[in-house]
Protein backbone atom coordinates (compact mmCIF):
# COMPACT_ATOMS: atom_id res chain seq x y z
CA UNK A 1 0.00 0.00 0.00
CA UNK A 2 1.34 3.49 -0.90
CA UNK A 3 2.27 5.67 2.01
CA UNK A 4 -0.46 8.21 1.22
CA UNK A 5 -3.05 5.52 1.79
CA UNK A 6 -1.78 5.03 5.35
CA UNK A 7 -1.91 8.77 5.89
CA UNK A 8 -5.43 8.88 4.46
CA UNK A 9 -6.60 6.10 6.76
CA UNK A 10 -5.03 7.80 9.76
CA UNK A 11 -7.01 10.99 9.12
CA UNK A 12 -10.42 9.37 8.72
CA UNK A 13 -12.91 10.19 11.48
CA UNK A 14 -16.66 10.58 11.79
CA UNK A 15 -18.21 14.02 11.14
CA UNK A 16 -19.12 14.33 14.83
CA UNK A 17 -15.54 13.57 15.82
CA UNK A 18 -14.11 16.00 13.24
CA UNK A 19 -16.11 19.05 14.37
CA UNK A 20 -15.29 18.55 18.07
CA UNK A 21 -12.33 20.88 17.52
CA UNK A 22 -14.65 23.87 16.92
CA UNK A 23 -14.71 26.15 19.97
CA UNK A 24 -16.93 29.08 20.93
CA UNK A 25 -15.88 32.34 19.17
CA UNK A 26 -13.90 30.45 16.49
CA UNK A 27 -14.12 31.53 12.87
CA UNK A 28 -15.22 28.63 10.66
CA UNK A 29 -15.01 28.98 6.88
CA UNK A 30 -17.40 26.76 4.94
CA UNK A 31 -17.02 25.57 1.33
CA UNK A 32 -18.68 27.74 -1.30
CA UNK A 33 -22.23 27.28 -2.73
CA UNK A 34 -22.68 23.78 -4.25
CA UNK A 35 -19.38 22.68 -2.72
CA UNK A 36 -20.81 23.07 0.79
CA UNK A 37 -19.81 20.11 3.00
CA UNK A 38 -23.31 19.41 4.19
CA UNK A 39 -22.54 16.57 6.60
CA UNK A 40 -19.86 18.56 8.41
CA UNK A 41 -22.08 21.64 8.61
CA UNK A 42 -24.91 19.52 10.00
CA UNK A 43 -22.53 18.04 12.60
CA UNK A 44 -21.34 21.52 13.59
CA UNK A 45 -24.93 22.77 13.96
CA UNK A 46 -25.70 19.68 16.04
CA UNK A 47 -23.30 21.11 18.62
CA UNK A 48 -25.27 24.38 18.86
CA UNK A 49 -26.06 23.79 22.52
CA UNK A 50 -22.35 23.67 23.45
CA UNK A 51 -21.18 26.63 21.35
CA UNK A 52 -21.44 30.40 21.55
CA UNK A 53 -20.94 32.92 18.76
CA UNK A 54 -19.02 30.76 16.34
CA UNK A 55 -18.54 32.89 13.23
CA UNK A 56 -19.51 31.00 10.07
CA UNK A 57 -18.05 32.61 6.94
CA UNK A 58 -19.72 31.44 3.79
CA UNK A 59 -20.68 32.59 0.31
CA UNK A 60 -23.97 31.69 -1.42
CA UNK A 61 -25.70 29.58 1.19
CA UNK A 62 -27.78 27.24 -0.97
CA UNK A 63 -27.93 24.31 1.45
CA UNK A 64 -30.19 24.09 4.52
CA UNK A 65 -27.96 26.67 6.30
CA UNK A 66 -29.27 25.73 9.75
CA UNK A 67 -26.65 27.90 11.42
CA UNK A 68 -28.85 30.79 10.22
CA UNK A 69 -31.99 29.60 12.01
CA UNK A 70 -33.36 31.85 14.79
CA UNK A 71 -32.95 29.07 17.39
CA UNK A 72 -29.19 29.03 16.65
CA UNK A 73 -28.71 32.78 16.99
CA UNK A 74 -26.60 32.58 20.16
CA UNK A 75 -24.47 29.71 18.88
CA UNK A 76 -23.59 30.92 15.37
CA UNK A 77 -23.09 34.29 13.73
CA UNK A 78 -23.05 33.96 9.96
CA UNK A 79 -20.87 36.31 7.93
CA UNK A 80 -22.13 36.23 4.36
CA UNK A 81 -19.89 37.14 1.48
CA UNK A 82 -22.81 36.74 -0.94
CA UNK A 83 -26.31 36.18 0.36
CA UNK A 84 -28.06 32.99 -0.71
CA UNK A 85 -31.57 31.70 -0.13
CA UNK A 86 -30.48 30.06 3.13
CA UNK A 87 -29.05 33.25 4.62
CA UNK A 88 -31.32 36.02 3.26
CA UNK A 89 -33.79 36.06 6.14
CA UNK A 90 -31.11 35.96 8.82
CA UNK A 91 -29.14 38.79 7.21
CA UNK A 92 -32.23 40.97 6.86
CA UNK A 93 -33.27 40.32 10.45
CA UNK A 94 -29.80 41.30 11.67
CA UNK A 95 -29.06 37.80 12.96
CA UNK A 96 -26.31 37.47 10.36
CA UNK A 97 -23.94 39.92 8.69
CA UNK A 98 -23.22 40.74 5.07
CA UNK A 99 -19.86 41.88 3.66
CA UNK A 100 -20.08 43.90 0.42
CA UNK A 101 -16.98 42.81 -1.50
CA UNK A 102 -15.76 42.18 -5.02
CA UNK A 103 -15.46 38.44 -5.53
CA UNK A 104 -11.82 38.63 -6.66
CA UNK A 105 -10.89 40.07 -3.27
CA UNK A 106 -12.44 37.34 -1.13
CA UNK A 107 -9.40 35.00 -0.97
CA UNK A 108 -7.41 37.94 0.38
CA UNK A 109 -9.60 38.05 3.49
CA UNK A 110 -8.25 34.67 4.51
CA UNK A 111 -4.82 34.67 2.90
CA UNK A 112 -3.77 38.08 4.19
CA UNK A 113 -5.08 37.50 7.69
CA UNK A 114 -7.96 39.99 7.71
CA UNK A 115 -10.14 37.06 8.73
CA UNK A 116 -7.87 34.50 10.45
CA UNK A 117 -9.32 31.03 9.87
CA UNK A 118 -9.61 28.76 12.90
CA UNK A 119 -11.37 25.89 11.18
CA UNK A 120 -12.10 25.27 7.51
CA UNK A 121 -14.85 22.84 6.46
CA UNK A 122 -14.60 21.79 2.82
CA UNK A 123 -15.64 19.06 0.41
CA UNK A 124 -13.20 17.48 -2.04
CA UNK A 125 -13.11 14.61 -4.50
CA UNK A 126 -11.48 11.30 -3.44
CA UNK A 127 -7.68 11.18 -3.73
CA UNK A 128 -6.17 10.24 -7.08
CA UNK A 129 -3.59 7.46 -7.41
CA UNK A 130 -0.97 9.77 -5.93
CA UNK A 131 -3.02 10.90 -2.96
CA UNK A 132 -4.21 14.29 -4.24
CA UNK A 133 -7.80 15.49 -3.83
CA UNK A 134 -9.28 17.93 -6.35
CA UNK A 135 -11.36 21.03 -5.61
CA UNK A 136 -14.36 19.60 -7.47
CA UNK A 137 -17.00 22.25 -8.26
CA UNK A 138 -15.45 24.96 -6.13
CA UNK A 139 -11.99 26.57 -6.18
CA UNK A 140 -13.05 30.23 -5.55
CA UNK A 141 -11.97 31.29 -2.02
CA UNK A 142 -11.76 27.66 -0.91
CA UNK A 143 -8.08 27.20 -1.79
CA UNK A 144 -7.06 30.33 0.14
CA UNK A 145 -9.16 29.39 3.17
CA UNK A 146 -7.81 25.83 3.18
CA UNK A 147 -4.23 27.06 3.04
CA UNK A 148 -4.84 29.62 5.80
CA UNK A 149 -6.79 27.39 8.20
CA UNK A 150 -5.36 26.36 11.55
CA UNK A 151 -7.46 23.20 11.26
CA UNK A 152 -8.49 21.84 7.86
CA UNK A 153 -11.30 19.30 7.68
CA UNK A 154 -12.77 17.93 4.46
CA UNK A 155 -15.50 15.63 3.36
CA UNK A 156 -14.35 13.17 0.73
CA UNK A 157 -17.28 12.54 -1.59
CA UNK A 158 -17.05 10.09 -4.53
CA UNK A 159 -19.80 12.13 -6.21
CA UNK A 160 -17.68 15.27 -6.24
CA UNK A 161 -16.32 15.58 -9.79
CA UNK A 162 -12.56 15.23 -10.10
CA UNK A 163 -11.51 18.51 -11.61
CA UNK A 164 -8.26 20.00 -12.82
CA UNK A 165 -6.63 23.27 -11.88
CA UNK A 166 -3.48 24.76 -10.39
CA UNK A 167 -3.96 23.38 -6.88
CA UNK A 168 -4.92 19.99 -5.50
CA UNK A 169 -4.55 19.02 -1.85
CA UNK A 170 -2.49 16.04 -0.77
CA UNK A 171 -4.16 13.91 1.91
CA UNK A 172 -1.32 14.84 4.28
CA UNK A 173 -2.47 18.49 4.23
CA UNK A 174 -5.76 17.75 5.98
CA UNK A 175 -6.19 17.45 9.74
CA UNK A 176 -9.30 15.30 9.46
CA UNK A 177 -11.09 13.59 6.59
CA UNK A 178 -14.68 12.39 6.64
CA UNK A 179 -15.98 9.98 4.01
CA UNK A 180 -19.46 10.85 2.74
CA UNK A 181 -21.61 9.83 -0.20
CA UNK A 182 -24.47 12.13 -1.19
CA UNK A 183 -25.36 14.08 -4.35
CA UNK A 184 -23.65 17.43 -4.83
CA UNK A 185 -26.09 20.34 -4.45
CA UNK A 186 -27.63 20.86 -7.87
CA UNK A 187 -29.86 23.38 -9.63
CA UNK A 188 -32.44 22.49 -12.27
CA UNK A 189 -32.28 24.21 -15.63
CA UNK A 190 -34.34 27.39 -15.92
CA UNK A 191 -37.28 27.67 -18.33
CA UNK A 192 -36.78 30.32 -20.98
CA UNK A 193 -39.95 32.41 -21.22
CA UNK A 194 -40.95 34.73 -24.07
CA UNK A 195 -39.39 37.80 -22.47
CA UNK A 196 -36.12 36.01 -21.79
CA UNK A 197 -36.09 34.73 -25.39
CA UNK A 198 -36.32 38.30 -26.61
CA UNK A 199 -33.58 39.46 -24.20
CA UNK A 200 -31.43 36.54 -25.31
CA UNK A 201 -31.87 37.52 -28.97
CA UNK A 202 -30.56 41.02 -28.29
CA UNK A 203 -27.69 39.72 -26.17
CA UNK A 204 -26.73 37.05 -28.71
CA UNK A 205 -26.64 39.73 -31.42
CA UNK A 206 -23.71 41.29 -29.53
CA UNK A 207 -21.67 38.07 -29.46
CA UNK A 208 -19.20 37.48 -32.30
CA UNK A 209 -17.53 34.24 -33.36
CA UNK A 210 -14.45 33.65 -31.24
CA UNK A 211 -15.81 35.54 -28.24
CA UNK A 212 -14.94 34.49 -24.68
CA UNK A 213 -18.02 34.25 -22.50
CA UNK A 214 -18.82 34.92 -18.86
CA UNK A 215 -22.38 34.09 -17.85
CA UNK A 216 -24.20 32.98 -14.72
CA UNK A 217 -27.22 30.78 -14.22
CA UNK A 218 -30.88 31.21 -15.13
CA UNK A 219 -33.19 31.74 -18.05
CA UNK A 220 -31.20 34.49 -19.80
CA UNK A 221 -27.90 32.54 -19.98
CA UNK A 222 -29.85 29.44 -21.07
CA UNK A 223 -31.64 31.48 -23.76
CA UNK A 224 -28.43 33.14 -24.93
CA UNK A 225 -26.59 29.82 -25.17
CA UNK A 226 -29.41 28.32 -27.23
CA UNK A 227 -28.88 31.10 -29.78
CA UNK A 228 -25.11 30.69 -29.88
CA UNK A 229 -24.96 27.06 -30.92
CA UNK A 230 -24.24 28.09 -34.53
CA UNK A 231 -21.28 30.27 -33.55
CA UNK A 232 -17.68 29.27 -34.09
CA UNK A 233 -14.78 29.00 -31.68
CA UNK A 234 -16.45 30.45 -28.63
CA UNK A 235 -14.52 30.23 -25.37
CA UNK A 236 -15.32 30.42 -21.67
CA UNK A 237 -13.54 32.37 -18.94
CA UNK A 238 -16.31 32.69 -16.38
CA UNK A 239 -16.43 32.81 -12.61
CA UNK A 240 -19.39 30.47 -12.81
CA UNK A 241 -20.22 27.47 -14.98
CA UNK A 242 -23.76 26.30 -15.56
CA UNK A 243 -25.41 23.86 -17.95
CA UNK A 244 -25.26 26.26 -20.90
CA UNK A 245 -21.61 25.39 -21.12
CA UNK A 246 -22.37 21.73 -21.85
CA UNK A 247 -24.88 22.76 -24.55
CA UNK A 248 -22.24 24.85 -26.31
CA UNK A 249 -19.65 22.07 -26.15
CA UNK A 250 -22.12 19.55 -27.53
CA UNK A 251 -23.10 21.92 -30.34
CA UNK A 252 -19.44 22.25 -31.35
CA UNK A 253 -19.60 26.02 -30.83
CA UNK A 254 -17.26 26.06 -27.84
CA UNK A 255 -13.70 25.16 -28.77
CA UNK A 256 -11.59 27.81 -27.05
CA UNK A 257 -9.24 27.58 -30.01
CA UNK A 258 -8.75 31.35 -30.28
CA UNK A 259 -8.14 31.87 -26.59
CA UNK A 260 -5.18 34.05 -25.72
CA UNK A 261 -4.62 32.21 -22.43
CA UNK A 262 -5.51 28.62 -21.49
CA UNK A 263 -6.19 27.76 -25.13
CA UNK A 264 -8.86 25.04 -25.50
CA UNK A 265 -9.64 25.19 -21.76
CA UNK A 266 -12.84 26.22 -20.01
CA UNK A 267 -11.64 28.30 -17.09
CA UNK A 268 -13.86 28.91 -14.11
CA UNK A 269 -13.90 29.22 -10.35
CA UNK A 270 -17.16 27.47 -9.39
CA UNK A 271 -19.93 25.42 -10.95
CA UNK A 272 -23.62 25.42 -10.22
CA UNK A 273 -25.97 23.33 -12.28
CA UNK A 274 -27.42 19.91 -12.83
CA UNK A 275 -25.71 16.56 -12.39
CA UNK A 276 -25.21 16.59 -16.16
CA UNK A 277 -22.85 19.54 -15.78
CA UNK A 278 -20.97 17.88 -12.93
CA UNK A 279 -20.65 14.66 -14.99
CA UNK A 280 -19.27 16.67 -17.92
CA UNK A 281 -16.64 18.20 -15.65
CA UNK A 282 -15.60 14.93 -14.04
CA UNK A 283 -12.06 13.90 -14.95
CA UNK A 284 -12.23 16.21 -17.95
CA UNK A 285 -9.04 18.21 -18.46
CA UNK A 286 -10.93 20.70 -20.65
CA UNK A 287 -12.34 22.20 -17.47
CA UNK A 288 -9.95 24.01 -15.16
CA UNK A 289 -11.02 25.34 -11.77
CA UNK A 290 -8.87 28.29 -10.72
CA UNK A 291 -8.99 30.46 -7.59
CA UNK A 292 -11.26 33.48 -7.93
CA UNK A 293 -8.45 35.99 -7.40
CA UNK A 294 -7.08 34.71 -10.71
CA UNK A 295 -10.28 34.10 -12.71
CA UNK A 296 -11.88 37.40 -11.65
CA UNK A 297 -8.73 39.50 -11.85
CA UNK A 298 -9.84 42.20 -14.28
CA UNK A 299 -6.35 42.35 -15.81
CA UNK A 300 -6.60 38.63 -16.66
CA UNK A 301 -10.16 39.09 -17.94
CA UNK A 302 -9.02 41.98 -20.14
CA UNK A 303 -6.48 39.68 -21.85
CA UNK A 304 -9.13 37.23 -23.04
CA UNK A 305 -10.13 37.15 -26.69
CA UNK A 306 -13.21 39.41 -27.23
CA UNK A 307 -14.43 39.08 -23.65
CA UNK A 308 -18.21 39.26 -23.27
CA UNK A 309 -19.61 39.50 -19.75
CA UNK A 310 -23.32 38.94 -19.26
CA UNK A 311 -24.83 39.74 -15.87
CA UNK A 312 -28.13 40.95 -14.47
CA UNK A 313 -29.63 43.63 -12.23
CA UNK A 314 -32.53 44.33 -9.93
CA UNK A 315 -32.77 48.03 -10.84
CA UNK A 316 -31.03 50.38 -13.26
CA UNK A 317 -31.42 54.13 -12.80
CA UNK A 318 -31.53 56.63 -15.63
CA UNK A 319 -27.84 57.43 -15.22
CA UNK A 320 -26.95 53.76 -15.71
CA UNK A 321 -26.17 52.90 -12.09
CA UNK A 322 -26.72 49.20 -11.51
CA UNK A 323 -28.24 47.79 -8.38
CA UNK A 324 -27.82 44.01 -8.34
CA UNK A 325 -27.53 43.09 -4.67
CA UNK A 326 -30.33 44.86 -2.81
CA UNK A 327 -33.96 45.82 -3.16
CA UNK A 328 -34.04 49.15 -1.37
CA UNK A 329 -32.50 48.48 2.05
CA UNK A 330 -33.33 44.77 1.82
CA UNK A 331 -30.06 42.93 1.22
CA UNK A 332 -30.73 40.44 -1.56
CA UNK A 333 -27.60 38.79 -2.98
CA UNK A 334 -24.08 40.16 -3.37
CA UNK A 335 -21.62 41.93 -5.57
CA UNK A 336 -20.08 38.67 -6.74
CA UNK A 337 -17.98 39.02 -9.84
CA UNK A 338 -20.23 41.42 -11.70
CA UNK A 339 -17.91 44.40 -11.41
CA UNK A 340 -14.76 42.32 -11.87
CA UNK A 341 -16.07 41.21 -15.28
CA UNK A 342 -17.57 44.57 -16.29
CA UNK A 343 -14.16 46.11 -15.65
CA UNK A 344 -12.23 43.32 -17.38
CA UNK A 345 -14.47 43.28 -20.46
CA UNK A 346 -14.29 47.07 -20.73
CA UNK A 347 -10.51 46.93 -20.90
CA UNK A 348 -10.42 44.02 -23.35
CA UNK A 349 -9.95 44.90 -27.05
CA UNK A 350 -13.27 44.00 -28.66
CA UNK A 351 -14.72 43.26 -25.21
CA UNK A 352 -18.30 44.05 -24.21
CA UNK A 353 -20.04 44.03 -20.85
CA UNK A 354 -23.76 43.44 -20.86
CA UNK A 355 -26.36 43.84 -18.13
CA UNK A 356 -29.44 41.88 -19.22
CA UNK A 357 -32.67 42.19 -17.29
CA UNK A 358 -36.43 42.07 -17.64
CA UNK A 359 -37.82 45.57 -18.08
CA UNK A 360 -40.32 44.95 -15.27
CA UNK A 361 -40.69 42.96 -12.06
CA UNK A 362 -43.65 41.77 -10.00
CA UNK A 363 -45.78 40.62 -12.94
CA UNK A 364 -45.18 43.79 -14.90
CA UNK A 365 -46.36 46.11 -12.13
CA UNK A 366 -43.02 47.85 -11.55
CA UNK A 367 -40.32 49.05 -13.90
CA UNK A 368 -36.77 47.88 -13.24
CA UNK A 369 -35.57 50.98 -15.06
CA UNK A 370 -36.18 53.79 -12.60
CA UNK A 371 -35.45 57.52 -12.33
CA UNK A 372 -33.63 56.97 -9.02
CA UNK A 373 -32.63 53.75 -7.29
CA UNK A 374 -34.92 52.92 -4.37
CA UNK A 375 -33.89 54.58 -1.13
CA UNK A 376 -31.36 52.32 0.58
CA UNK A 377 -30.29 50.49 -2.59
CA UNK A 378 -26.65 49.79 -3.17
CA UNK A 379 -24.86 50.75 -6.37
CA UNK A 380 -23.29 47.47 -7.42
CA UNK A 381 -21.75 48.70 -10.67
CA UNK A 382 -21.09 52.38 -11.16
CA UNK A 383 -22.42 54.38 -14.08
CA UNK A 384 -18.81 55.04 -15.12
CA UNK A 385 -18.29 51.41 -15.99
CA UNK A 386 -21.55 50.09 -17.36
CA UNK A 387 -21.63 49.45 -21.08
CA UNK A 388 -24.63 47.68 -22.66
CA UNK A 389 -27.97 47.35 -20.87
CA UNK A 390 -30.41 44.97 -22.55
CA UNK A 391 -34.10 44.32 -21.91
CA UNK A 392 -36.78 42.59 -23.96
CA UNK A 393 -37.28 45.99 -25.65
CA UNK A 394 -33.79 46.48 -26.98
CA UNK A 395 -30.19 47.43 -26.35
CA UNK A 396 -28.97 50.65 -24.71
CA UNK A 397 -25.28 51.31 -25.29
CA UNK A 398 -24.29 53.63 -22.44
CA UNK A 399 -20.56 53.77 -22.88
CA UNK A 400 -19.23 57.32 -23.17
CA UNK A 401 -22.75 58.81 -23.26
CA UNK A 402 -23.75 61.89 -21.29
CA UNK A 403 -26.19 61.66 -18.42
CA UNK A 404 -28.92 62.97 -20.74
CA UNK A 405 -28.10 60.46 -23.49
CA UNK A 406 -28.01 57.60 -21.00
CA UNK A 407 -31.42 58.53 -19.62
CA UNK A 408 -32.94 58.75 -23.09
CA UNK A 409 -31.33 55.46 -24.22
CA UNK A 410 -32.58 53.64 -21.13
CA UNK A 411 -36.11 55.01 -21.50
CA UNK A 412 -36.17 53.52 -25.02
CA UNK A 413 -35.65 50.02 -23.57
CA UNK A 414 -38.02 50.44 -20.60
CA UNK A 415 -41.45 48.83 -20.81
CA UNK A 416 -43.69 51.11 -22.96
CA UNK A 417 -46.16 51.49 -20.06
CA UNK A 418 -43.50 53.28 -18.00
CA UNK A 419 -41.75 55.34 -20.65
CA UNK A 420 -43.94 58.47 -20.42
CA UNK A 421 -43.51 58.70 -16.64
CA UNK A 422 -39.77 58.11 -16.88
CA UNK A 423 -39.47 60.87 -19.48
CA UNK A 424 -41.60 63.22 -17.39
CA UNK A 425 -39.38 62.67 -14.35
CA UNK A 426 -36.16 63.09 -16.34
CA UNK A 427 -37.32 66.31 -17.97
CA UNK A 428 -38.76 67.70 -14.72
CA UNK A 429 -35.35 67.25 -13.14
CA UNK A 430 -33.46 68.70 -16.11
CA UNK A 431 -35.87 70.99 -18.04
CA UNK A 432 -33.15 71.95 -20.53
CA UNK A 433 -33.08 68.35 -21.78
CA UNK A 434 -36.66 68.65 -23.05
CA UNK A 435 -35.98 71.97 -24.78
CA UNK A 436 -32.87 70.50 -26.42
CA UNK A 437 -34.79 67.41 -27.54
CA UNK A 438 -37.52 69.58 -29.11
CA UNK A 439 -34.93 71.74 -30.85
CA UNK A 440 -33.18 68.72 -32.31
CA UNK A 441 -36.48 67.16 -33.39
CA UNK A 442 -37.67 70.33 -35.14
CA UNK A 443 -34.28 70.76 -36.85
CA UNK A 444 -34.60 67.20 -38.15
CA UNK A 445 -38.12 67.91 -39.47
CA UNK A 446 -37.02 71.06 -41.31
CA UNK A 447 -34.08 69.15 -42.86
N1 LIG B 1 -38.01 45.76 -7.27
C1 LIG B 1 -38.53 44.89 -6.40
N2 LIG B 1 -38.36 43.55 -6.49
C2 LIG B 1 -37.63 43.10 -7.50
C3 LIG B 1 -37.05 43.95 -8.45
C4 LIG B 1 -37.27 45.33 -8.31
N3 LIG B 1 -36.75 46.19 -9.17
N4 LIG B 1 -36.38 43.21 -9.35
C5 LIG B 1 -36.51 41.94 -8.98
N5 LIG B 1 -37.28 41.88 -7.88
C6 LIG B 1 -37.65 40.66 -7.16
C7 LIG B 1 -38.25 39.66 -8.11
O1 LIG B 1 -39.65 39.80 -8.21
C8 LIG B 1 -37.85 38.36 -7.45
O2 LIG B 1 -38.71 38.13 -6.34
P1 LIG B 1 -39.35 36.69 -6.09
O3 LIG B 1 -38.16 35.80 -5.82
O4 LIG B 1 -40.20 36.94 -4.91
O5 LIG B 1 -40.07 36.35 -7.35
C9 LIG B 1 -36.48 38.65 -6.87
O6 LIG B 1 -36.44 40.06 -6.68
C10 LIG B 1 -35.32 38.24 -7.77
O7 LIG B 1 -35.48 38.87 -9.02
P2 LIG B 1 -35.00 38.21 -10.38
O8 LIG B 1 -35.14 39.23 -11.44
O9 LIG B 1 -35.67 36.89 -10.58
O10 LIG B 1 -33.50 37.97 -10.04
P3 LIG B 1 -32.49 36.89 -10.59
O11 LIG B 1 -32.65 35.61 -9.89
O12 LIG B 1 -32.52 36.88 -12.08
O13 LIG B 1 -31.12 37.52 -10.09
C11 LIG B 1 -29.68 39.31 -9.53
C12 LIG B 1 -30.78 38.81 -10.46
C13 LIG B 1 -29.31 40.69 -10.00
C14 LIG B 1 -30.17 39.35 -8.11
C15 LIG B 1 -28.46 38.32 -9.62
O14 LIG B 1 -28.04 38.24 -10.94
C16 LIG B 1 -27.31 38.79 -8.76
O15 LIG B 1 -27.31 38.53 -7.58
N6 LIG B 1 -26.32 39.49 -9.36
C17 LIG B 1 -25.18 40.04 -8.63
C18 LIG B 1 -23.95 39.20 -8.71
C19 LIG B 1 -23.47 38.92 -10.10
O16 LIG B 1 -23.88 39.52 -11.06
N7 LIG B 1 -22.56 37.98 -10.22
C20 LIG B 1 -22.02 37.58 -11.49
C21 LIG B 1 -22.81 36.49 -12.14
S1 LIG B 1 -22.26 34.86 -11.69
Image: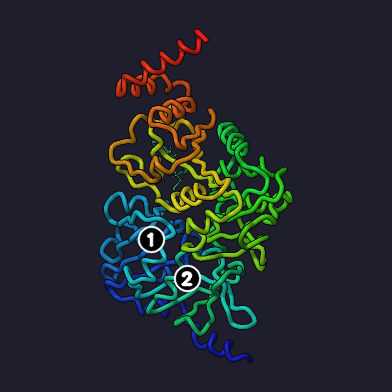
Q: Position of residue 169 (x, y in %)?
A: 53, 77
Residue contact between numbered discs 1 and 2, judged by CB atoms under 8 Å: no
Q: Secondary structure at mark 1?
A: helix
Quadrant position of the N terminus in the picture = bottom right
Q: Position of residue 447 (x, y in %)?
A: 52, 10
The residue positioned 60% from the left and 64% from the top of the image is 288
Which residue, given by chain and number where applicable, does mark 1 sit on? 66
Distance of label 1 from label 2 (alpha carbons): 24 Å
Which quadrant would residue 87 be assigned to in this image? bottom left
The residue positioned 41% from the left and 36% from the top of the image is 320
Residue 240 in sight = no
Which residue, given by chain and number where applicable, does mark 2 sit on? 143
Which quadrant would residue 204 be assigned to in this image? top right
Horizontal side, residue 395 vs residue 244: left or right = left
Depth-wise, is mark 1 or mark 2 nearer the camera?
A: 2
The numbered disc on residue 309 is none
The residue positioned 36% from the left and 15% from the top of the image is 435
Looking at the picture, tell me which residue is in the foreground, 435 or 57: 435
> Is residue 296 shown above or below 154?
above
Amino acid sequence: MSRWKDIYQSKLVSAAEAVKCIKSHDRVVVGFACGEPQVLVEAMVHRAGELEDVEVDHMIAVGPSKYCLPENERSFRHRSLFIGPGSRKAVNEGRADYVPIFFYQVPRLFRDGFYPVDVCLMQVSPPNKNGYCSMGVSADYSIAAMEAAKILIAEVNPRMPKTYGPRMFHVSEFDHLVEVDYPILAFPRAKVGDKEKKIAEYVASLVDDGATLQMGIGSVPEGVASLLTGKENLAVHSEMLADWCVDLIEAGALTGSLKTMHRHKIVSTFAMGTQELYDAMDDNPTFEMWPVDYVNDSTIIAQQHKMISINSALQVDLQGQICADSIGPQLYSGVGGQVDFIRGAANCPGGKSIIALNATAKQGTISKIVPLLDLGSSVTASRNEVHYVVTEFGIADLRYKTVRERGEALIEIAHPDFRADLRKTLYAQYPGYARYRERIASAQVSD
